[in-house]
Amino acid sequence: MERLAARLGVDVAGHSPDTGEGAFGATRLARILQTRLIPSRGERPGRPTDPNWVLHPKVPMTEETLRKLTLLAERISTSKRKVSAMQVAAQLLEDSLRGS
């Protein structure tokens, strides 16, 4: 990828997460989220989250992107742990920018 970028005269901004594609990629993403999302504590705990996520910005996106994130979140969610579309988006962003 770096060689191609150099030939084109551009910089590599980041790499896609190493989750793969298709069902196996979705399974890997699910495993990552299921292990990183920790239930909150207290009398009325909210949706599990990654304790390292301290910012909660709004990110503009197309309806199509939100639809795809929602489908991924539905596939990843279990009866014990619901994953939101934005948690999927956050994890994909974290993985994509790690090491860049």
Image (cartoon, rainbow, N blue to C red):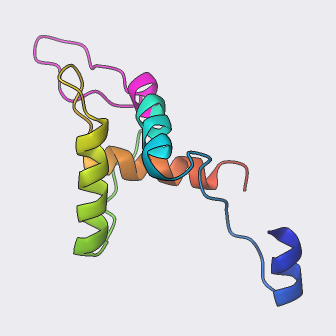
Q: Residue furthest bottom?
A: 8
Q: Position of residue 4 (x, y in %)?
A: 83, 78
Q: Position of residue 70 (x, y in %)?
A: 24, 53
Residue under the point 36% across and 21% down: 38
Magenta part, dominant SS: loop
Q: Position of residue 59 (x, y in %)?
A: 34, 65
Q: Quadrant of the N terminus?
A: bottom right
Q: Nearer the viewer, residue 20 or 62?
A: 20
The answer to whether 41 is drawn above or below residue 30 in the figure is above
Residue under the point 17% across and 26% down: 46
Residue under the point 84% across and 69% down: 2
> Would residue 55 be counted in the magenta stretch?
no
Whether residue 6 sits left or right of residue 14 in the image: it is right
Residue under the point 67% across and 63% down: 14
Q: Nearer the viewer, residue 68 or 97?
A: 68
Q: Quadrant of the C terminus?
A: bottom right
Magenta stretch, residue numbers: 33-52
Q: Nearer the viewer, residue 63 or 50?
A: 63
> Would residue 47 be counted in the magenta stretch?
yes
Please identify the quarter of the rendering in which residue 23 is found: top left
